Image (cartoon, rainbow, N blue to C red):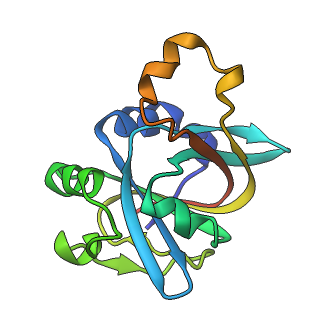
Amino acid sequence: MKTRDPLTLPESLLAQLKEGAFLTVKAGDALNTMTIGWGLIGILWQKPVFMVPVRTSRHTHSLIEKAKDFTVTAPSGDMQAALNFCGTRSGRDLDKIKACDLKTQPGQDTVSPILDMPGLHLECRILYKTPMDPAHMDASLQSMYPAKDYHILYFGEILSCYEQ
C-alpha cells in the first residue's frame, strides 16, 4: 500500500471519475456501494475534503444519512462491468457487492470499508451535508433532474488516501 497526499490527486482522480468510481457506505449492518461519476476534491475548513453528491432517490442516500463516513474507490484496473452494474441497479433490490463478486476490506480510519481492488482509496469522515436548492441552480441544469430528485452534497474530510 502506498500512502498518497490527496491534494496531489485531482488530475488523476478526476480522470477516473469520468470513467466511474465506487462510493461505499456502511450504516449499522447495512452496506452498499454505488457508482459515482461526480465529485470534487480540495481544501475546506483547512482540511483536505472530497465532496460527493448523492441523489435523494438512491438507496445509498438512506444509508449515508445514518453514517458518519464513506469511502471512495477509484479502480485502476478494468472494472467497467461492475461500475455499470452498480450504477444501474439498486441496493434496495440486491446485494451489489455480492452480485459483482466484489470483496471489501476494513477501512483504516472509517467504519465504511473500501473495495478490495487495485486503485486509489479515499476514507472520508462526513463534516457537512447540504441539499441542492433548485432555486439557486442555473436553469440549464434543471434537465438533469426530471424527477426532481436533487442531490445532497456530502463533504468528507479525507482521513486516509492510498493506493493498493
Residue 161 percent coordinates (x, y): 55, 58
Above/below status of 102 relative to 57: below
Quarter-of-image position of residue 12: top left
> Position of 43 compared to 93: left or right?
right
> Position of 55 compared to 22: left or right?
right
Q: Residue furthest right?
A: 45
Residue 2 appearing in the image: no
Residue drawn at 27 percent across, 57 percent down: 86
Quarter-of-image position of residue 1: bottom left
Above/below status of 140 relative to 30: above
Residue 103 appearing in the image: yes
> Position of 101 compared to 9: left or right?
left
Residue drawn at 45 percent across, 34 percent down: 14
Q: Residue furthest bottom?
A: 29
Residue drawn at 47 percent across, 75 percent down: 113
Compare residues 15 and 22 and report the one nearer the observer. Answer: 22
Above/below status of 93 relative to 118: below
Compare residues 41 and 141 and report the one nearer the observer. Answer: 141
Residue drawn at 35 percent across, 33 percent down: 18
> Position of 58 compared to 77: left or right?
right
Quarter-of-image position of residue 126: bottom right
Residue 50 percent coordinates (x, y): 62, 46
Q: Residue furthest front?
A: 147
Which quadrant of the figure contains the C terminus?
A: bottom left
Compare residues 135 and 123 and report the one nearer the observer. Answer: 135
Residue 129 percent coordinates (x, y): 72, 50
